[in-house]
Amino acid sequence: MTILNDKFFRSRFNIETLGTAAVLFAVGIISRIPFRSNVLHHWDSVNFALALDHFDVRLHQPHPPGTFVIYIMLGRLVNWLLHDPNASLVWVSILASGLSAAFIFVLGQSWFGKRTGLIVAALMLSSPLIWFHGEVALSYMLEFFWVLALVLSCFSACKGSNKALFASALLLGLAGGVRPNTPVFMFPLWVFSVRRFPIRKIAISLIVMAFGVALWMVPMVMMSGGPAEYWEIIQSWRGSHMEESGNLGVMAIYVARLGTFTLYCLGIGIVPVIWAIFRHWRDWKRLLWKDQRVQMLVLWIAPGLAYFALVHIRQSGHTFTIMPAFIIVTGIAIAVISRGWADGVRHAWIVMTAIVVGCNSLFFLLGPPNLFGSSRSIFSAPTRAAISEYDVDVTQRLEAIRKEFRPEETVVLAGSRNFRLPDFYLPEFQFASLSYQLGQNVVVLPEHVHTLVLFDDSVLPQFSVSSHLRSLPLPGGKNIRYVTWNESQQVTLSQAAFEMQDR
């Protein structure tokens, strides 16, 4: 038995295919609407929300390298209708989820047949990690869709389509305006896809690609102070971004994160992948040398996989350049295994897909906000509970601060994932950007400020034993810590310490 058909399937963009894609698009939208987040879910979310009003990478609106121009512009377009930055960015994620379901079906059907197309679409829609990112104000879900659109155009270019050649070049150039890593990781796949075109056409496509880059890069640089200032920002960002690379201990952490995020994405779908790889190892090695589809999958996965394992990975969404490929590999594995069981189990592929989809969906819908009782980010589960619990916690803290403290004499300090929330939600308080500006600096609070509110427990944890500290109870048993002082006292603040002394 051959595990894959010998040739590409012909793309059949008929009424049936378009109808199925439209249904999957609708399911992607409808399944996300009930669970969408109500507050900005991460400091990156705050950066993006602030950039909707004023784009400037120097202010981390958005954060360096700032190559999120297309994402921000789409957010501004939706915000023009909704007048709610968080809701607008969440809706970008929701719409990208629907488009991803449609595109991954079309790509899966084009590569490996309709059965595989349906499997991968179902896996994508039920993936806990993808479902989670379809509910929050982050750019990863748009990247997920963009990668699928790019790969679909590369697939068509590989079959000799001139239109797809130029479309893939434009999409690759524009991809940097969604997320900075996408064009770098996807470039080898694009080169492989266009290798048989005449040099003249490839040269023209490179010009098209450069035009796509210019469309987002020129506005980004100009809105951030011009080329000289932007270059300084990039040099500083690059130094902090790369300082950990090459450390074996850190690389072990990266590999652990990558493995954990892959499990969050595939869930129990990882089981048929492992089974198919080891059961048909020799077949896969043979296909690597003769089947363009397998070669394209390897070129799709390898650059990002190497970077995440060896150089840098922090957030689960960083992997969304390669996670669509992992889902397609899982769909292939289910199709291959079920074909081998076809004589013993009727419609085996439906049974296997239903088991994976059911278990993964239940994990998202009923799973805890954290695994193993740990609050560490790697154990923060991509579940409905994680979204709703964070929404409730942040909302309660914001309401309590607004109710109990006077903005004209109060500063709010936040930490960890919350450190930019006061910049967006509490601008009326003094030093709204204190958490962001503090950095490695020491700040002397002005005379008119008499109260410091610690937004969460990650801020100055050693300060909890101080006799100056007070506590404001919140619903559910949590507290907000704060300290007050009189006009004769002066307060000095840093990331690590709080000092109070007489003037």
Image (cartoon, rainbow, N blue to C red):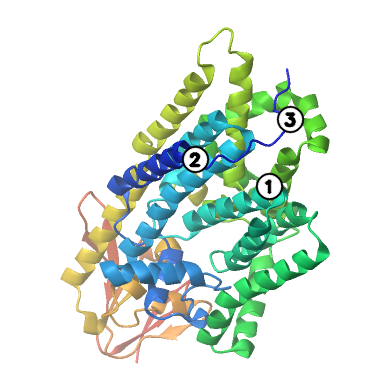
**Separation (CA) of disc 1 from disc 3:** 22 Å
Residue identified by numbered label 1: 301
Q: Compare marks 1 and 3 and give the one earlier in the sequence.
A: 3
Compare residues 458 and 81 and report the one nearer the observer.
81
Residue 469 visible from this viewpoint: no
Q: Which of marks 2 and 3 is in front?
A: 2
Q: Which residue is drawn at 53% across and 57% down?
A: 143
Is 247 located above or below residue 379 in the figure?
below
Which class describes the residues within 10 Å of circle 2: few (<14), some (14-19), or many (20+)? few
Using the rendered view, name the quadrant where residue 481 is placed: bottom left
Q: Nearer the viewer, mark 1 or mark 3?
A: 3
**Image quarter (top left, top right, bottom left or bottom right) of the C terminus:** bottom left
**Image quarter (top left, top right, bottom left or bottom right) of the N terminus:** top right
User: Residue type at mark 2?
Assistant: Asn
Q: Which residue is drawn at 58% across and 64% down?
A: 175
Using the rendered view, name the quadrant where residue 311 is placed: bottom right
Would you say 395 lies left or right of 215 here? left
Residue identified by numbered label 3: 6
The total of numbered circles placed on residues is: 3
Rendering coords of residue 166 (x, y %): 65, 63
SS type, badge 1: helix
Q: Residue at x 41, y 48 (%)?
A: 98
